[in-house]
Image (cartoon, grey):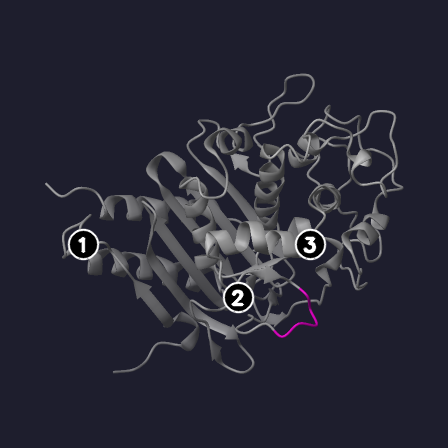
């Protein structure tokens, strides 16, 4: 039998459908449907690799990886392949901030310059709550500035990284306008370090990553040797893969600096739903959409996008050479995470997440 091209062959697929929740015959059918869906997406969108994990009712029910983690060296992707998760990091940072708020170690409504003394005192200062909701008046990336997004500078600390934006004027009076800002989350990282007395990466490891069982998750440090790290690619107009431009994420670690597997992110979502990371009141506060001072809805909570009906919470991530997504349906107890080692693969992420959640929901439905 002629083999399929490597880019469309499953390098590793692990399926754990719970027999107690579904008839035995459902497991292969569900796995087959998901595999077929993912191969179709890979072929249509020409992804070098795609890794996916799905959980339902506290259990990982699907984890699979397809294609090549390293095209040049023909290294297959596996469920252990580690990807940059870009702005999905904001959701993880938000949980760490909300933990400290629940412990009364961060006041969400206090001016941030009181905790992060490197930041100047504005006439109308931002607060941690406003920064979490992208209402803090901190600018986003300026793609016209050399090195603003494609950063090549290694910053020794989060406080040092605030030098990129702390002297810039507000984009608007804090609270009045939604402006998506990764630099706002860098400032939150500075607040977190001040409140915890611990370096951001160490605090995250001890308070979020390890308690959630995120075994391979770590901060992206380009010089570090990270087992199973995927190589990143971009696509030319004629759909050819090229090596992605190198970026040092030390200027944005609390905003977009997490390396992880989709299984790690599914464990994170599952731990949130189980109440293992945050009590329910703080979790619900985090998942409540914010409004501007003029009562205009933003569609964004504290570190998470929230659907209009509140049934979905999610966050996408883009990094140079990678695209990712984390999606939860809290009332259905479903968590979906996936990543590809291709820049700017964004168009179908929510559609794919919803379909994976739907299949998971059907599969574990109580049989007649």
Horizontal side of 95 relative to 25 (left or right) equals: right
Which residue is rendered at x = 42% and y = 64% of the image?
A: 43
User: How would you classify the magenta stretch by its main secondary structure?
Assistant: loop
Residue extending farthest top: 294
Query: Can residue 348 be seen here?
Result: no
* CB under 8 Å between discs 2 and 3: no
From which residue to which does the magenta span run?
A: 221-225
Which residue is rendered at x = 49% and y = 30% of the image?
A: 284
Horizontal side of 24 relative to 32 (left or right) equals: left
Mark 2: give few (<14), some (14-19) or many (20+) Cα within 10 Å: many
Comes first in the chain, label 2 or label 3: 2
Q: Quadrant of residue 196?
A: top right
Mark 1: give few (<14), some (14-19) or many (20+) Cα within 10 Å: few
Which residue is rendered at x = 50% and y = 50% of the image?
A: 325
Q: How far apart are marks 3 and 1 (CA)?
A: 41 Å
Q: Which of 281 and 145 is in front in this view?
A: 281
Residue 42: x and y, percent? Answer: 43, 63
* CB under 8 Å between discs 2 and 1: no
Mark 3: give few (<14), some (14-19) or many (20+) Cα within 10 Å: many
Q: Which of labels 2 and 1 is toward the front?
A: 1
Could you say which disc has been placed on residue 270 in the image?
none
Q: Circle 3 sits on which residue? A: 253
Q: What element carries label 1?
A: loop
Q: Circle 1 sits on which residue? A: 19
């Amino acid at each position: 039998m002629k083999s399929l091209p490597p880019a469309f062959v499953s390098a590793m697929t692990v399926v754990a459908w719970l027999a107690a929740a579904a008839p035995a015959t459902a497991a292969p059918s569900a796995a087959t449907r998901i595999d077929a869906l993912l191969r179709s997406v890979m072929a249509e969108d020409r992804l070098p690799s795609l890794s996916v994990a799905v959980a339902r009712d506290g259990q990982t029910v699907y984890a699979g990886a397809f294609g090549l983690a390293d095209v040049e060296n023909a290294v297959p992707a596996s469920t252990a392949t580690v990807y940059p998760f870009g702005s999905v990091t904001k959701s993880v940072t938000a949980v760490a901030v909300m933990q400290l708020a629940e412990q009364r170690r961060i006041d969400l409504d206090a001016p941030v310059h009181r905790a992060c003394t490197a930041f100047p005192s504005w006439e109308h200062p931002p607060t941690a709550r406003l920064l979490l909701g992208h209402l803090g008046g901190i600018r986003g990336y300026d793609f016209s500035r050399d090195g603003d997004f494609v950063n090549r500078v290694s910053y020794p600390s989060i406080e040092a990284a605030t030098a990129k934006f702390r002297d810039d004027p507000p984009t608007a009076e804090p609270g009045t306008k939604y402006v998506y800002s990764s630099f706002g989350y860098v400032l939150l990282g500075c607040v977190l370090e001040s409140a915890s007395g611990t370096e951001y990466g160490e605090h995250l490891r001890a308070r979020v990553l390890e308690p959630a069982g995120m075994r391979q998750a770590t901060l992206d440090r380009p010089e570090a040797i990270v087992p199973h790290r995927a190589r990143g690619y971009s696509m030319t107009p004629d759909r050819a893969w090229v090596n992605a431009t190198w970026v040092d994420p030390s200027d944005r670690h609390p905003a977009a600096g997490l390396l992880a597997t989709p299984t790690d992110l599914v464990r994170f979502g599952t731990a949130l739903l189980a109440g293992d990371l945050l009590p329910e009141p703080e979790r619900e506060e985090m998942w409540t959409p914010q409004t501007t001072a003029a009562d205009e809805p933003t569609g964004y909570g504290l570190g998470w996008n929230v659907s209009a009906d509140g049934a979905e919470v999610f966050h996408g991530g883009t990094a140079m050479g990678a695209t990712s997504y984390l999606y939860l349906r809290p009332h259905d107890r479903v968590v979906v995470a996936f990543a590809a080692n291709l820049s700017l693969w964004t168009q179908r992420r929510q559609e794919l997440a919803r379909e994976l959640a739907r299949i998971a929901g059907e599969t574990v439905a109580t049989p007649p």
